[in-house]
Image (spheres, helix red, strand yellow):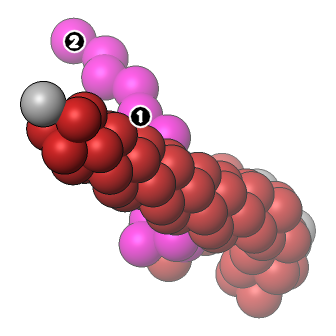
Amino acid sequence: MVRCREIGAADLDAVADLLTTGFPKRSREYWIEGLRALLQPFERLVRRLRVHREIKKNLITANVSQLVARVQDLNTKASNCL
């Protein structure tokens, strides 16, 4: 059975070893540099998405808090009218 998964930073050494064995005219350093170059944009994107998700979560939390405070204020005013 063949299993597939995304290659991550932790896999660089093993992948570089395999590539060096399969393509012996290129050095291990060549493959490490190439793999790191390919991995960098992905890692930046993941960081950006995490920051975006955190900002969005904080905005939603702030909006819900404001909404709850407004409802409580309206409830207070309505009970004062009774």
Residue 5: numbered disc? 1
Residue 4 visible in the current orientation: yes
Give neighbour class at mark 1: few <14, some 14-19, many 20+ (Cα, 10 Å). few
Residue type at mark 1: give it.
Answer: Arg
Q: Quadrant of residue 39?
A: bottom right
- Main structural element of the magenta stretch: helix, strand or loop? loop
Q: In this view, does 62 lie to the left or right of 33?
A: left
Mark 1 vs mark 2: in front: 1
> Mark 2 = which residue?
1
- Residue 31 placement (x, y as % from top left): 77, 71
Determine the residue positioned at 31% across, 17% down.
2
Looking at the image, how many numbered discs can be counted on the residues?
Answer: 2
Q: In the rendered image of this protein, does residue 76 appear above or below residue 16?
A: above
Can residue 8 be found in the magenta stretch? yes
Amino acid on which disc 2 is placed: Met
Please, what secondary structure does the residue beneath circle 2 have?
Answer: loop
